[in-house]
Image (spheres, grey):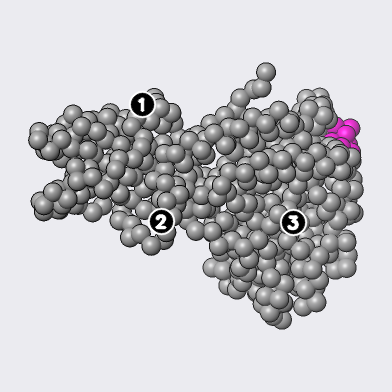
Amino acid sequence: MAYSDKVIDHYSNPRNVGTLDKSKKNVGTGLVGAPECGDVMRLQIEVDEATNTITDAKFKTFGCGSAIASSSLATEWLKGKSIDEALAIDNMEIVEELALPPVKIHCSVLAEDAIKSAISDYRVKNGLPALELAHH
Amino acid sequence: MLKLPIYLDNNATTPLDPRVLEAMMPYLTEVFGNAASRNHPFGWAAEEAVDYAREQIAKLINCDPKEIIFTSGATESDNLGIKGVFEMYSQKGNHIITATTEHKAVLDTCKHLEKLGARVTYLPVNEQGLISLEELAAAMTPETILVTIMYGNNETGTIQPIREIAKIAHQYGALFMTDGTQAVGKVPVDVIADGIDLMAFTAHKMYGPKGVGALYVRRKNPRVKVTAQMDGGGHERGMRSGTLNVPGIVGLGKACELAMLEMEADTARLRTMRDRLEKELLTLEESYVNGSREHRLPHVTNISFKYVEGEGLMMGVKDLAVSSGSACTSASLEPSYVLKALGLSDDLAHSSLRFGLSRFTTDEQIDYAINHVKEAVTKLREMSPLWEMFKEGVDLSKIEWAEH
């Protein structure tokens, strides 16, 4: 399969690989996917509670090049965004940015799920109700 | 300078040996006759070349030259052998025994015959990839006409206990066929000592050209016959019609001759290189060899690297031409059915690489491959949440994954 230059770039030089301290109250963690399906993404956000702004984002992904690129791109986009702005990220924006082929759209869906799941975790930790997460 | 990418997918196909090409060249140019043209020198020259190739092939597998039926390759030979026996021996019975790890050319042929009234037993394999002789004996019935079990597996290189299997088949009055595609020319195959009644094999897995193969069909003790699957001029003793591919056949013959001359030296060299590659890659934690390490073709290793995903791994080893699963199924994302038959979970099957070395593989290429794979696996594990969890002692099987 031919990968786009952007996928290859994110795969070769992934941004923000790593782990945030999940015990901190202002860190939200999303773990989505399943090993049998061939991809698992863990995406974490650190939030400045005063401004409701995402100050840091990290990921680790088990998956194909497109899955790694989707989550790497997501962490880049999340930094500096407000929670509401982050919630508005649509998987099709990732598809367009990375020029993902149809068989790889699920990677972008997973990345969007990971963002929402991390935000939901952050909300629950801070006494807010969990988000209704769509299951794909 | 090392040329990249490095070809280590020799179970899919091998490069043509220059000596084979040299032998073929005259038959692609001036000696163009039809081997079936009996009434002029053009035909005679072609027939002579074909007869010589038959002898070269016969020597390699210890059969009579007349027992070689030329085909377009191993897939056709598998089809001709299995379908041909099913039709020819339909009076005797309709039961065929094979194994779950066979090539699709065997499995899909058997499935096709099931629609035509065959009863097929698909024997399971153990974690080494070997069938159980007890289960084979238990599956035999008076209606069993054919046992077809491959010699060496294309994905793992596992070699089945061919002689014992043949004995059991014969005890119950059935014929024994083997798909020798990966084994012929790589390990000693002797149809008499092994008790093989039919055997499919092909030129392009042993440094010969693509598009030519053969089916060995025993002529005595017992005399085996197969019903032709193509109608036409009655070539190849009526079993396979179609003008003979003279240059291809000459190439197959030359490839067999070279294999016979060089097998011992090649095997020693390949085994040393393969073992070094394997030993080095197994220094990576949580890496496992798939299939039997004891009963195995000398040039193959199949290794799973836990906690990295197969497609991502393939992208990471872009300087190597290797495959995950067999070449025929690597276009889909389905994990290899062969590895699953060995009891591997989907994720371990997904994260496997198959290395197939050749006569032309060098030590320098193996050095490069070792470093390249180690780097890729290490990098992907640093990026893998599963690896991190494993390192923290989390039991991944206890996690409730959100299926998608």
**Could you say whether the residue bearing mark 3 is in a helix, strand or loop?**
loop
- Residue behind mark 2: B394
- In terms of image quadrants, where is residue B36? top right
- Quadrant, the N terminus of chain B: top right
**Could you say whether the residue bearing mark 2 is in a helix, strand or loop?**
loop
Region in magenta: B41-51
What amino acid is labelled 3 in the image? Glu
Residue A38 magenta-drawn?
no
- Residue behind mark 1: A6
**Pointer 3 or 2: first along the chain:** 3
Q: How many marks?
A: 3
Gap between marks 3 and 2 measured at Cα: 33 Å
Residue A41 at least partly seen: yes
- Residue behind mark 3: B294
Q: Chain of mark 1?
A: A
- Nearer the observer, B239 or B86: B86
Q: Chain of mark 3?
A: B
